[in-house]
Each structure stands twice: as C-alpha cells, then as structure tokens.
Image (cartoon, grey):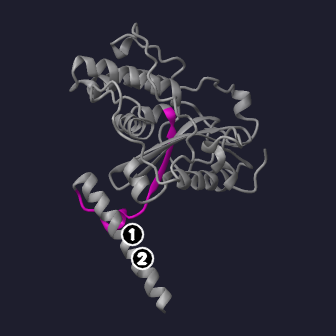
Amino acid sequence: DFDDESMKDAANEEIDKLARWYQKTTGKSLEPSQRHITIETMTSHQSALNPKVHKLYTYYQNVVHNDPDPFSGETKSTNHKMSNGNDDDNDDNDGHGDVNGDSDMPTNPADLDWGNAPSYFKESISTMLTTYLQPLSEEQRNAALENYYSFYQFLVEAPFPFTRQQQQVQRPRCNNDMPTVSSSSNTNLDCGLYHQHYRLGDVLLAVGVVDILPSGLSSVYLFYHPTFSHELVALGKYAILKEIEYARDTLKLPYYYLGYYIESCQKMRYKAEYKPSQL
C-alpha cells in the first residue's frame, strides 16, 4: 500500500510539472483529456506546409545545435546547448541545420526549385511562405526563406524517389501525393519520407523524420521542443521507442534502422542500447 501511495504521489507530481510547463508555454491550462502525447504521421511535403514545423526546427537548431536564428537577425546563437544526457538520441546530424549560404538564391518563393514535389505542395508553398514571412523585415525574410529551403532539401525532399515497382516489393504500399493520415490507419503507405508530429494539446512537441523502406523503417532525424525534453520527457529516447512500435505493430516491417554506428563516436553510442540488433 505504501508503494501504491508513493507511485500515486509521483504520478501526481509529474502531472503537476506537465501542467506548469504547458501553462508557461501556451498561457493555457492543460485539460485532463490532453495529458497524453498524440502522434500523427503524414508525408514530408504535407508536414512542410505547416509553418509551425519549420518554426520548431529553427528553434531546436538554435538552442541545441547553436545555429543562427533567422527570425532574430542574429548571425550566431548565444544560447548554450540544452541537454539532460538523453537528448542526443535520434540525432546524429549536428551540422545539417546550417543554411546553404547561397547569396544568389531567389528571394521570391515562387522562383525556387521545388524539385519533384507533389502538385499540392507546389500549388500551396508560395502562398504559405509569403504569409508566414510577411511580418519580418526584408533581411529576416531572406534569411528565413534561405533557412526554410535548406530545411526542405534536408528533411522534406526525397533525393532518391522509389519507382512504382520498388514501392511494391514488400509491404507497405502507398502514394507520394497522399495527404495527412492518422497513425492508427496507415498500414498501406508507400515507401518514402514521412514526418511524425508529436503533440501535447495545442503544442507541437517534436517532429520525427522517418523513411519507409521496402523492408524496414529508417529513423532520419528528430527535432523537438528543447525545454520539454530537458525538463519532462527525453524525447529522443521516447521517439525511438515509438518508431520501433510503429514499424513492428502498424507497418508490420521486420527492421528498424538507426543509421551508422561508430563505437568511438560518443554521439552514436546510444544506438547500442536498443536490442536485439545487427551491425
């Protein structure tokens, strides 16, 4: 009974911490029905049409990787990395958030090359970016647009699109032009790049970037709300466990890929913690 009471007290304390964080972050109260993290899976292009996704990406890169914040006009972040010892999980790509530094890059979103993006993205992206960046000064707009395009090339655009024959080698099967789908019903997705949105109430906590392959799920990158991960839940570890669950239970795929493993690299050692595994 004493143990039960202790567990209840610990649970209530965590709920109180969660509620305080939510109130501080949003200015709103966290309703009882919102006290859990929801996950929604969608195509990378559908995700990239949501300005909150890019805003979270720039915030994460600035705080965790010390990248410049294009919305502040800073040339270099003055923030220190925020870590609780667990947050490097699912994130090996320290330098990929940098903008491409192309001074000849167009300043009009309509003039950018969106590659093999689906039609719904090309039809919407110029309007979205114009509205998203309109409140900024000209210098900030240019920096933010360059940062968005770098983000697009890094985590949205699929550099090696699968042919229809390759997409149907094994489960899953899907369509690259597919709109938003829920995690509970997307057992027939095509191979390709997807974003998984982790939410708590109205807050976008994290975006996990995954690649669905013919024989497995590949974890590409994770960017998240640094203070939540530091103070409450180590989102790097949490996302890995949810991706393993998603590959096994929803997609019914045999393998989950965490990418390269270099034993001498401290930043990659966390990958050895997940077993059974193969090198």
Q: Is residue 78 visible?
A: yes
Give, as a three-letter code, the residue at label 2: Ala
Q: Which residue is mark 1?
A: 14
Residue at 39%, 20% in the rendered image = 146
- Horizontal side, residue 200 vs residue 140: left or right: right
Image mark for residue 10? 2
User: What range of the chain is rendered magenta?
Assistant: 28-44
- Horizontal side, residue 148 vs residue 3: left or right: left
Q: Looking at the rendering, which quadrant does residue 66 occupy?
A: top left
Residue 34: in magenta span: yes
Cα separation, mark 1 vs mark 2, equals 6 Å
Front-most of residues 116 and 79: 79
Q: Position of residue 217 (x, y in %)?
A: 66, 43
Residue 136: in magenta span: no
Residue at 23%, 57% in the rendered image = 28
Q: Up-down: is 3 above or below 231? A: below
Image mark for residue 200? none
Number of numbered tags placed on the structure image: 2
Q: Up-down: is 137 above or below 4? A: above
Give, as a three-letter code, the residue at label 1: Glu
1 and 2 marks in contact (CB < 8 Å)? yes
Residue at the outermost right position: 278
Q: Position of residue 235 (x, y in %)?
A: 49, 52
Front-most of residues 160 and 273: 273
